[in-house]
Image (tube, rainbow, N blue to C red):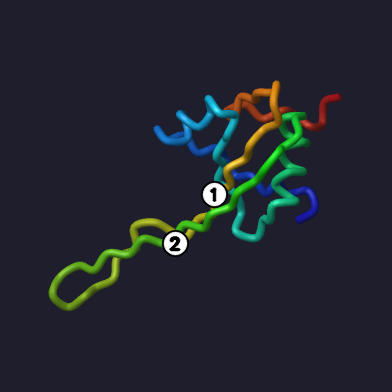
Amino acid sequence: MQGISPIIKNLTTEKSSLAQANKQYTFLVRLDANKVLIKKAIKDLYGVEADKVTISIMPKKVRFLGSKGKVFTKRAKIKKATVSIKEGKTIDPNKFKDSKKK
């Protein structure tokens, strides 16, 4: 995963917006990402240290239609990461820091 950020985008829901008051930010990450890579990506993109990273895998959502049980997939399998930032720091999850400009 050299050169590819494990963070795809931020997730903005009502629950994640309320968690931002406690310095917890939720991101959609690649399925092959782990906690160490996510911590490094937060440091590179935002310039702050991540205190804690929690990962959860959301299974794909499947619905069965009709009497013959046709399978209809509504959502693919995704991985979410909730990142806690150390005290005294805040970030704007909508803006990525350009790591090439220094």
Q: On the image, which quarter does residue 52 sit in?
A: top right
Identified at 61% across, 24% down, the residue is 92
| Residue lying furthest left | 67
Q: Position of residue 62 (x, y in %)?
A: 33, 64
What's the amino acid at mark 1?
Lys
Vertical side of 60 occupied by 9: above or below: above
Identified at 15% across, 70% down, the residue is 66
Q: Position of residue 56 (x, y in %)?
A: 53, 54
Please indicate whether residue 50 sits to the left or right of residue 94 in the image. right
Image quadrant in which the N terminus is located: bottom right
- 82 and 74: which is toward the camera: 82
Which residue position is annotated with label 2?
59
Question: Which mark is first along the chain, 1 or 2?
Answer: 2
Q: On the image, which quarter does residue 59 sit in?
A: bottom left
Q: Sort mark 2 into few (<14), some (14-19) or many (20+) by Cα contacts within 10 Å.
A: few
Please tell me the numbered disc located at residue 80: 1
Identified at 72% across, 28% down, the residue is 97
**Mark 2 element type:** loop
| Residue lying furthest right | 102
**Mark 1 element type:** strand
Q: Position of residue 61 (x, y in %)?
A: 36, 60
Image quadrant in which the C terminus is located: top right
Answer whether labels 2 and 1 touch (C-beta < 8 Å).
Answer: no
Vertical side of 83 occupied by 56: above or below: below
| Residue lying furthest bottom | 68
What's the amino acid at mark 2?
Pro
Alpha carbon of mark 2 to alpha carbon of mark 1: how far?
11 Å
